[in-house]
Amino acid sequence: MIYLASASERRQELLRQIGVAFVTLPADIDETPRPGEASLAYVRRMAHEKALAGARQRDRLGLAWAPVLGADTIVLQADVIVHKPADAGAARAALRRLSGGDHVVYTAVCVLGRGCNEAVARTDVTFKVLSDAEIDAYCATGEPIGKAGGYAIQGRAALFVARLAGSYSGVVGLPLYECGRLLRSEGVL
């Protein structure tokens, strides 16, 4: 059993897929990048800070000890983070930026257990050229709101992906290979 420092339904589904029992302890942290912070350093820091917040919450609530998993996902296009859109306008802008080009998805995982173990998965994704009608129809579903890069690859945005090299589950939000390796080191798998 572990504690998942996330409220993400996608991460919960992925943990269930590999048979990991968990309790969610959503982490509420400031996700603002630091001035000049490199994107890879940022995603690693976010995963680590989420795991720390989960561990503090576990201890504050007096819960049984178990490892805490934190994760964070970012989408980079031309070395610029395409943030999680808060509304349809921001989602349209994100999708227009990704349309017809390549982007990189990094998902960092941090497991705080007997020690601190971390991993990052990189996935290269190519989107087809998206028409305004496709972008508008997708935004109307509400699916892109709050998703890294403004899309959910496990949903309707799967139709946008022309090529993917790397971890599909990492794009969803939890790279299972890397996560499994870290959890095995804690005796969870």
Image (cartoon, helix red, strand yellow):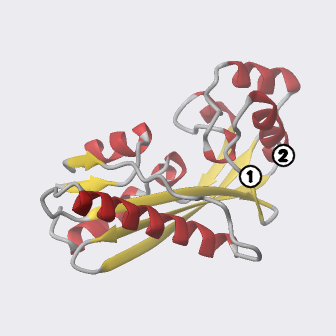
Residue in the picture at 50% in, 46% down:
172
Residue in the picture at 44% in, 72% down:
119
Is 104 situated left or right of 133 in this image?
Answer: left
**Residue that numbered label 1 is attached to:** 82
**Residue 73 placement: quadrant:** bottom right
Q: Amino acid at mark 2?
A: Arg
Q: As rendered, which of 11 and 36 lies closer to the eye?
A: 36
Looking at marks 1 and 2 on the same chain, the residue that comes earlier in the sequence is marked by 1
**Residue 189 placement: quadrant:** bottom left
Circle 2 — which element?
helix
Instruction: Provide residue 146's location: percent of width, then percent of height.
Output: 61, 39
Instruction: Provide residue 90's location: percent of width, then percent of height.
Output: 79, 37
Q: As rendered, which of 9 and 25 lies closer to the eye?
A: 25
Q: Estimate how packed mark 1 is, as few (under 14), some (14 to 19) or many (20 or more) residues with alpha carbons within 10 Å.
A: many
Q: Amino acid at mark 1?
A: Val
Q: Estimate how packed mark 2 is, as few (under 14), some (14 to 19) or many (20 or more) residues with alpha carbons within 10 Å.
A: some
Instruction: Provide residue 47's location: percent of width, then percent of height.
Output: 47, 65
Residue in the picture at 39% in, 62% down:
53
Q: As rendered, which of 26 and 78 lies closer to the eye?
A: 26
Is 175 situated left or right of 38 in this image?
Answer: left
**Residue 35 placement: quadrant:** bottom right
**Residue that numbered label 2 is attached to:** 97
Pick out the residue farthest to the front. Answer: 60
Instruction: Provide residue 124's location: percent of width, then percent of height.
Output: 65, 59
Residue in the picture at 66% in, 48% down:
163
- Please report contact status of discs 1 and 2: CB closer than 8 Å, yes or no: yes
Quadrant, the N terminus: bottom left
**Residue 136: image tag:** none
Q: CA distance from mark 1 to mark 2?
A: 8 Å
